[in-house]
Amino acid sequence: MTTPPDGPSDGLDPVERRLRDALVAEAASVEPAGDGLDEIRNGIALGRQPAGRRWWQFPGAPALAAAAVLLLMTGGVAIALHGNGSQAGDGVTAGNGGGPSRGISPAPTTSSSDGSAAASPLPSTVPPSSSPPIPIEGDVVVYYVRDDATAGRRLYRESRPNPGTEPVAAALSALFDGPPVDPDYVSSWPTGTTVTAYTVDGTTGTVRLGGGARTISARPVSSTAVQQIVYTVTANDVHITKVRVLIGSEVVTPADGAVPAPATDVLALIQLTSPAEGATVTSPVDISGTGTAFEGTISWEITSLPASAATGSGAGGTTMGGANGELAEFHTTADLAPGTYKIRAFEASAKDGSALHVDTKTFTVK
Amino acid sequence: MSTDAPEESWGAGDAVTHLYAVHYRSLVRLAALLVRDRSLAEEVVQDSFVAMHGAWRRIDDPERALAYLRRTVVNAARSALRHRGVVERHAPAVVPDATDIPSAEHSAMVALEHQEVLRVMASLPARQREVLVLRYYVDLTEADIADTLGISRGAVKSHASRGMASLRTALEASR
């Protein structure tokens, strides 16, 4: 019964036929997930590492990523020009009927610039309208979201080592590459969201998303989600004043881009930036962050972990941040014995002393 | 602004879009036969497309692009396997479908036969497995297999015959 009708004439013996049938059946059971083209374009635009390796998890990788920076600046532009092709490609993936598909021949208006720009990482192919982004000293910055019990959903930043590539693309890659380091934060964008292109035209940045982002059905897309990207882009390239966000080919911001919302409306009212979540540091420990509070008074307290060991080894105090709705940096230090600690920074309510706008980090002193 | 862009003048981006539409699924299936893990297979193929994009200037030919992709996929699959050692850990994907009432028994038998073959395949050395997959699934000629794997036709022959011999012995023994 396993002999196919054409069996005797295919020149195969029974074992060969059995092998072929098994391979064909096994192959037929494999159905790609469907966002492969996004993944590929994302990989091209962002200098993809081989499976499973992401630059910010592998400190040795920046050199490899650096090789991709020019490709990003040129190839990224090329991909953005290629919008029509993207739609066509998505549309025909279901049909695997073999033979070249005539319906998707390259868009003639873009093919030449696309080809030369993407294939040759030459500085001369950078469009004249875009001034090269200023590399940020130190880390790149990404923004996540946390629900502040009294102030609503707010943006909190984390930093990632700068791979030495174009900082916005590096930041966007990091933003969607994994969960935030601080478990209290989340992303407004679904897991599996990918950046298929990042392009710059003048002072407007355009971020095209694919993958998991396509599962967002609500329109308009939440302003928190949009601002998460707007802040991530503008924080890493001071030239950018507006950001357009696309999901596939649909623009989900105003057509000419979204501007960053006022900081006091969207940013964390108190955020610790040092020590970083999970960091190992030396004493005296630098305690820094950004915040605003009544009379500028930011409270902080440190408890040792596990909590049972807390007695006597903690620390606490107040430091000056911004006041009257103005966000300002705060700095202080604490002397701590080796161990693992949790720090909370907050505003002590003027009404009843309760902790408002709390941010916490767990860290280790060696 | 001409409307008759000839196929030869594809840019790298166009090539990716076109080749993805036509070949992505079959390449993922090829990779899946080699690594036996769908998502790893997809990563392998995606990486190969990224590599092709980077090498497009040197390829610049839709005909050669497929051969390039196939070669890259086979190589990437081999190193992914080495890297992760997934061969043993992943169960075959073919499972009898209980809702297939009229022929459930028959398809279960067929599936079992397939499993046996695939299990033996998974135990073969990488080269033998690659040659057999390219020969019996992709249906390549000896010359094309040699080109894809970067080995001689004689080597293709001997990998194929050794692989088939192991298969025959193993299937005979389990009878």
Image (cartoon, coloured by chain):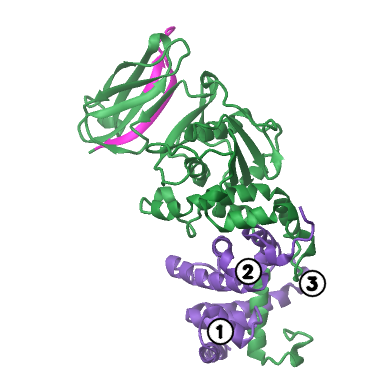
Chain colours: A green, B purple
User: Which numbered circle lies on residue B27?
Assistant: 2
Q: Is A172 positioned to the left or the right of A346 in the image?
A: right
Q: Is A208 positioned to the left or the right of A291 in the image?
A: right
In the image, residue A135 sits, relative to residue B101, either above or below, namely: above
Give the Cα distance between marks 3 and 1.
44 Å
Give the Cα distance between marks 1 and 2.
18 Å
Residue type indicated by callout 2: Leu
Give the Cα distance between marks 2 and 3.
33 Å
Which segment did they paint magenta?
A345-365
Q: Earlier in the sequence, mark 2 or mark 3?
A: 2
Q: Main secondary structure of the magenta part?
A: strand
* Mark 2 residue element: helix
Looking at the picture, do discs 1 and 2 lie on one chain? yes
Question: How many other residues sit within 10 Å of disc 3, few (<14), some (14-19) or many (≥20)?
Answer: few
Q: Is B98 positioned to the left or the right of A228 in the image?
A: right
Chain letter belonging to callout 2: B
In terms of depth relative to the viewer, which is nearer, A187 or A134? A134
Q: Quadrant of residue B99?
A: bottom right
Q: Earlier in the sequence, mark 3 or mark 1?
A: 3
Question: How many other residues sit within 10 Å of disc 1, few (<14), some (14-19) or many (≥20)?
Answer: some
Q: Comparing marks 1 and 2, which lies closer to the viewer?
A: 1
The residue where tag 3 is placed is B102
